[in-house]
């Protein structure tokens, strides 16, 4: 149950359920074992929840009345269970209308309610790791009236956001930093306001736990001897089923109640025997660590120096509240292990939590046992096209292997995992490890592909430098979600990979202009003897009708030359540039389109010809600072060319709010209308410059 406790036995009349725990500072004993006994005997069954069909909507009775978590404290147990049911209904209504995180939010409803009834987070500190499970927290911190705006432009963010509420401390979306952050908050609070005795709580999932930074923070927390509560939300999954040795360690914790019950019963029995009792129990105590090492998954945390408590049923609200109340004032770092079920309360999500992690909009079927998902567009997504290209390459070349950091489903790698299990590697949420792992595989003769979201590759910057670029090893980075991603917002936009990847020597940086570029670009990357990256956005992949030109190192594809100017596009805006050029032609402006394909190395021959013939608009879905447009300007400046008529269209030097992807592209001027407007403005500027010269 808990590290460092002094085990007691009863008076000999019955097995004792009491395990006294004293802190190193001499506090009163805490009766965790008795609480677990009550947890097993007083389990509360949740009220039935079936979710909405197309014509059903719950009459919310309590959620609209909760303006702050303080109001939860006055509710009865039955009323709190009603709040839980209403939260699940609100979640189902939202997700049936738009893509959103679902199963993970269903799984933390009781935990969220328990936290807010035991702590006062108007002054205490709470960090939800990653943050995608924040919806119940938003609903009971006064945001129910705005909840229908979540993930919409101008509405609530789908992640924590301090601009919305003081109960949200950080904007988050990446995994693993919660323990470090809350430890920093605690250290500062102890220095600045020690008299307030603020409690500090981090809630982290078992999928995020293997991130190396988590254990760095836990190690530091023990060294600093800070009063810190880490709640391990263990649903046996991240986005998809967890992997690795740590997962097996946590699985052993599910036998902890068996271990504790066995020890109590044996102690009672031995005390009944003459001349045995206490001496034999001491012997039993001496061998307990060996038994716990086999049975008890919490041993890892105990060895780190954390006081381990659990496991606790994460859907037993009274038990959760009791445990939280007991650990609230325990001194030193504590880990409370909570078992939850991802998708809890919604049958389709319980049956398939992976698909319902962030499902497409759906409506309930008439039999209440399934859902009908709304149909998507007919064009394939770039994610699917890249996955198919990788699959084809793996079929041809036994050296090709794939690494992903817990994103098999997100990157559409299920078929690769099924067809090539020996060459598919899921490292868990450990991007830095994945990149260094890939470097080792490449050194040994393989052709590894690191298939990863652009925003998550940032977590492995140093290993791109040392283990890949510096060694000049043939590792291919396929960077999904490069560009704006829509409703997930600023933590998930892939805005920066282009800037930092092109700074590394040896790396070839590419982006397909359309779907026709994908397969040949993947094949080209795998044929290189050094590292490369391919970036592509979260959108359907259109195909521009043309005679496709082969991929050659550092060579752009000229779709057509323009007499007045040219779009030089790096990436998936290629089809929109073609559409914009057609509209401009109808307005009397002849603008060409060049599909750059490469950011490093640049096709300077083609680019310089375009610069000398008229205005140039560089187009890219990445940050303007140091991106493709900057590379063009640098090359032109080094060559002594006039750069005054070069304009960069890119993501500006700020974070882009959440909303629909189409709304974001329009805001940035990266849709057809924006491209047309930019070309007209550049043409006017060019005309003024020529008139001035005359």
Image (cartoon, helix red, strand yellow):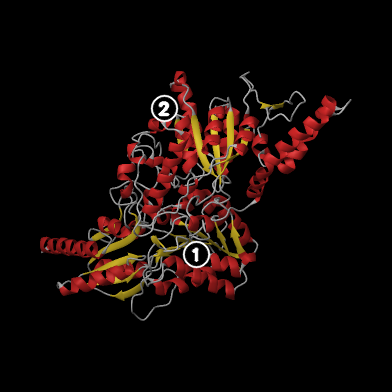
Quadrant into which the N terminus falls: top right
Helix, strand or loop under label 1 = loop
Q: Residue at x 60, y 73 (%)?
A: 397
Where residue 220 appears, as percent x and y from the top left, is: 57, 33
Q: Tags 1 and 2 in contact by the CB under 8 Å rule?
A: no
For disc 2, the neighbor class at 10 Å (few under 14, some 14 to 19, many from 20) is some
Q: Which mark is residue 638?
A: none
Where residue 276 appears, as percent x and y from the top left, is: 87, 27
Q: Say above or below: 225 vs 214.
A: above
Query: Which residue is labeled 2 in the image?
Result: 123
Of callouts 1 and 2, the N-terminal one: 2
Pick out the residue farthest to the right.
275
For disc 1, the neighbor class at 10 Å (few under 14, some 14 to 19, many from 20) is some
Judge by depth and name the residue closer to the eye, 639 or 71: 71
Query: Which residue is labeled 1 in the image?
Result: 412
Where residue 263 appears, as percent x and y from the top left, is: 75, 35
Gap in Å between the C-alphas at discs 1 and 2? 42 Å
């Amino acid at each position: 149950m808990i590290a460092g406790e002094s085990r007691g036995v009863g008076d000999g009349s019955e097995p004792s359920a009491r395990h006294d725990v004293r802190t190193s500072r001499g506090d009163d004993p805490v009766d965790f074992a008795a609480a677990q006994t009550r947890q097993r005997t007083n389990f509360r069954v949740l009220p039935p929840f079936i979710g909405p069909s197309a014509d059903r909507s719950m009459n919310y009775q309590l959620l609209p009345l909760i303006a702050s978590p303080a109001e939860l404290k006055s509710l009865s147990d039955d009323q709190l269970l009603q709040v839980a049911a209403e939260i699940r209904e609100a979640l189902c209504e939202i997700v049936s209308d738009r893509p959103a995180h679902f199963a993970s939010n269903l799984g933390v409803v009781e935990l969220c309610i328990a936290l807010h009834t035991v702590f006062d987070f108007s002054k205490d500190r709470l960090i939800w790791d990653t943050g995608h499970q924040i919806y119940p927290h938003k609903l009971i911190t006064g945001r129910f009236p705005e909840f229908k705006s979540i993930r919409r432009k101008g509405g609530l963010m789908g992640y924590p956001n301090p601009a919305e509420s003081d109960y949200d401390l950080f904007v988050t979306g990446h995994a693993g930093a919660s323990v470090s952050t809350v430890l920093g908050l605690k250290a500062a609070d102890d220095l600045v306001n020690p008299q307030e005795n603020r409690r500090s709580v981090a809630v982290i999932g078992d999928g995020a736990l293997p991130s190396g930074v988590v254990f760095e923070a836990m190690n530091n927390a023990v060294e600093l001897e800070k009063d810190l509560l880490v709640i391990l939300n263990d649903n046996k999954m991240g986005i998809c089923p967890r992997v690795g040795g740590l997962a097996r360690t946590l699985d052993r914790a599910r036998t902890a109640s068996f271990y504790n019950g066995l020890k109590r019963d044996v102690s009672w029995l031995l005390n009944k025997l003459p001349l045995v009792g206490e001496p034999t129990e001491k012997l039993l105590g001496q061998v307990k660590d060996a038994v716990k090492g086999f049975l008890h998954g919490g041993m890892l945390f105990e060895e780190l120096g954390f006081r381990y408590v659990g496991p606790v049923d994460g859907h037993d609200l009274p038990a959760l509240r009791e445990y939280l109340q007991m650990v609230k004032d325990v001194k030193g770092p504590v880990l409370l292990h909570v078992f939850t079920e991802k998708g809890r309360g919604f049958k389709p999500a319980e049956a398939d939590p992976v698909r319902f992690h962030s499902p497409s909009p759906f409506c309930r079927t008439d039999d209440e046992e399934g859902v009908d998902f709304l149909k998507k567009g007919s064009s394939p997504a770039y994610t699917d096209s890249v996955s198919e290209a990788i699959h084809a390459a793996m079929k041809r070349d036994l050296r090709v292997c794939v690494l992903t950091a817990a994103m098999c489903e997100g990157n559409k790698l299920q078929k690769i995992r099924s067809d090539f299990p020996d060459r598919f590697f899921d490292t868990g949420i450990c991007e830095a490890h994945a990149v260094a792992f890939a470097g080792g595989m490449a050194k040994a003769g393989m052709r590894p592909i690191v298939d990863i979201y652009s925003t998550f590759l940032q977590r492995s910057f140093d290993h791109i430098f040392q283990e890949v670029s510096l060694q000049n090893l043939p590792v291919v980075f396929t960077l999904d979600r490069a560009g704006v991603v829509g409703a997930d917002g600023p933590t998930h936009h892939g805005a920066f990979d282009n800037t930092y990847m092109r700074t590394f020597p040896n790396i070839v940086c590419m982006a397909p202009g359309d779907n026709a570029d994908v397969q040949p670009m993947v094949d080209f990357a795998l044929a290189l003897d050094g590292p490369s990256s391919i970036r592509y956005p979260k959108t359907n992949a259109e195909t521009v009708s043309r005679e496709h030109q082969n991929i050659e190192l550092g060579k752009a594809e000229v779709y057509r030359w323009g007499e007045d100017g040219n779009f030089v596009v790096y990436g998936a805006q290629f089809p929109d540039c073609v559409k914009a050029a057609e509209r401009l032609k109808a307005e009397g402006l002849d603008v060409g389109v060049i599909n750059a394909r490469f950011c490093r190395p640049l096709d300077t021959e083609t680019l310089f010809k375009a610069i000398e013939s008229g205005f140039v608009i560089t187009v890219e879905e990445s940050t303007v600072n140091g991106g493709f447009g900057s590379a063009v300007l640098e090359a032109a400046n080094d060559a002594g060319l006039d750069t005054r008529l070069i304009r960069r269209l890119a993501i500006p030097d700020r974070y882009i709010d959440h909303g629909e992807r189409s709304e974001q592209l329009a805001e940035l001027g990266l849709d057809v209308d924006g491209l047309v407007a930019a070309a007209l403005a550049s043409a006017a500027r060019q005309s003024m410059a020529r008139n001035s010269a005359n």
